[in-house]
Every structure is written in C-alpha cells, then in structure tokens.
Image (cartoon, rainbow, N blue to C red):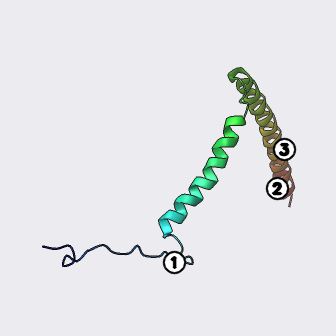
Amino acid sequence: MSEKNVKTTETKPQKKDKNAKPNFFVRIGRWFKNTFSGMFAELKKVTWPKFSTVVKQTGVVLGVVLFFMVIVTLLNLGLSELMNLLTSNL
C-alpha cells in the first residue's frame, strides 16, 4: 500500500463561537468560586475574641434582657389591673 491511497481520518479542530456562553453549571460554579473565595479570604483576616470574653458578653446580654423582661412584665400586670378596675366600675 502506498501512502497516497490511505485516507487520513484527522478532523480539523472546530472553532469556538465567541458569543456562546458556558453552560449553566459552569456559570454557577464560577459564581460560587468568585463569591466564596473572597469571603474565605476575609474570614482569615478576622481576629476572633477569646472564649472568656464571649462568655462575659453573653452574660451581660442575658442580664439586660432579663432586666427588661421583668420591667415589661410588671408594666403589663399593672396596666391590666388598672383596666380591670376601670371596667368593673362600669
């Protein structure tokens, strides 16, 4: 056999369409990569508080919430008793 008679099966590479968008999953993957890579980079820069500081601040917050809960409850009870006195006289 001579080389002239043998047909080559090579195909030319197809040109990519410059206007074609990547498929949906590729676009979602790129969006996640761009969004979360920046977020993780910022989280590495954060200075986290010590555990003892967190416990102290949590205690302060709970104390303030309990204080105002007692005040609002007493105010509610006082106003409801006042309403009962006013409506019982009518």
Give the labeled residue for mark 2.
88
Give the labeled residue for mark 3.
75
Q: Inspect the image, locate mark 1, and give the three-letter code of the amino acid beneath it.
A: Asp
Q: Position of residue 30 (x, y in %)?
A: 56, 59
Q: Position of residue 14 (x, y in %)?
A: 42, 75
Instruction: Answer few, some or many: residues within 10 Å of disc 1's Cα (few below 14, many 20 plus, some between 14 and 19).
Output: few
Q: Is residue 90 left or right of residue 25?
A: right
Q: Is residue 35 left or right of residue 69?
A: left
Q: Is residue 2 left or right of residue 70?
A: left
Whole-angstrom CA distance, mark 2 to mark 3, is 20 Å
Q: Which residue is rendered at x = 68% and y = 23% of the image?
A: 51
Instruction: Answer few, some or many: residues within 10 Å of disc 2's Cα (few below 14, many 20 plus, some between 14 and 19).
Output: few
Quarter residue 58 falls in: top right
Q: Is residue 17 above or below residue 32?
A: below
Whole-angstrom CA distance, mark 3 to mark 1, is 72 Å
Give the labeled residue for mark 1.
17
Q: Earlier in the sequence, mark 2 or mark 3?
A: 3
Secondary structure state at the residue bearing disc 1: loop
Q: Earlier in the sequence, mark 3 or mark 1?
A: 1
Quarter residue 55 falls in: top right
Q: Earlier in the sequence, mark 1 or mark 2?
A: 1
Q: Position of residue 57 (x, y in %)?
A: 76, 28
Looking at this rendering, what residue extends furthest in the top direction? 52
Q: Which residue is rendered at x = 77% and y = 30% of the image?
A: 63
Q: Nearer the viewer, mark 1 or mark 2?
A: 1
Seen from the viewer's position, the closer of residues 59 and 21 is 21
Q: Nearer the viewer, mark 3 or mark 1?
A: 1
Q: Is residue 44 left or right of residue 29?
A: right
